[in-house]
Amino acid sequence: MVATGAAYGWFDELFPDLAEAYCITLVEGIAPEELVRRLGGADGTASTEWTESTGVSGLADAAFALLEESGDREQLLAMTRVGAWTLLIEPNGYLGVSEDRALPASVGTRWVSHFVNINGVDSFVWAEDGGLRLAFEPTFCESRWGSDPDGSLDAMRAAGFDFAPDPPDDYAPGLACFALAEHLTGVVLTEDLLRDGAFRCGRAPIR
């Protein structure tokens, strides 16, 4: 049974600061330390206060602080293990959906990432072993690219993506991204994980 975006309705309600602008990435079999290295960063943020974080509360403020401190040159990376996967959260970030960063970082693994910002710009990327399987803008999901752009259409529809030219007013492509990511990875993100999970924070250069 494919998850639906409606099952993730709690995200906007419980984590409004993060929900305004974020990139969420799931990477299989890669530890946080290796993930930071692949993205060109270094362990530990400039402030040792954010080396470890319980839950995502406050991470948006920390990300903005790091951007200001670094002159918009570094992005906060918050990571935790979920079974065999590493969950990477970038408040106000986008490295996970940047194909020039994600594709090289996905060598030897599966990489599923989705992004939205406060201006309504959004993106979904599925990569495997350095190759792009599927990418699209969730708001305009009728246009897709990659080596398998149509292989997940049934899952996309079940997740809540609407391919009609004029979707309904309550259309929520951002939530549908959570459900599609769950379908592709088997990882269920929960409010408990985001509220109470032990996150290790690092940073990576913005190029």
Image (cartoon, helix red, strand yellow):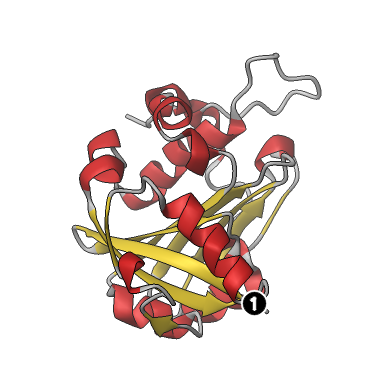
Q: Nearer the viewer, residue 72 or 152?
A: 72
- Amino acid type at mark 1: Arg
**Residue 142 point in image, percent of width and height:** 73, 38
The answer to whether residue 20 is above or below residue 13 is below
Looking at the figure, which quarter contains the N terminus? top left
Q: Residue 199: percent from the left, percent from the top? A: 28, 60
The residue positioned 74% from the left and 38% from the top of the image is: 140
Is 117 placed above or below 15 here? below
Compared with 52, 202 (above or below) is below
- Check disc 1: other Cα within 10 Å, few if <14, some if 14-19, many if 20+: some
Which residue does the image show at 63% across and 15% down from the upper left?
170
Q: Quadrant of residue 134?
A: bottom right
- Vertical comparison of 118 with 14: above or below: below
Q: Residue furthest top?
A: 169
Residue 1 appears in the picture as rendered: yes
Mark 1, residue position: 73
**With 4 as the anchor, is 186 left or right in this view?**
left
Query: How far across and down, in percent of the image, does residue 104 sit?
Result: 54, 81
Residue lying farthest right? 165
Count up the numbered dots. 1
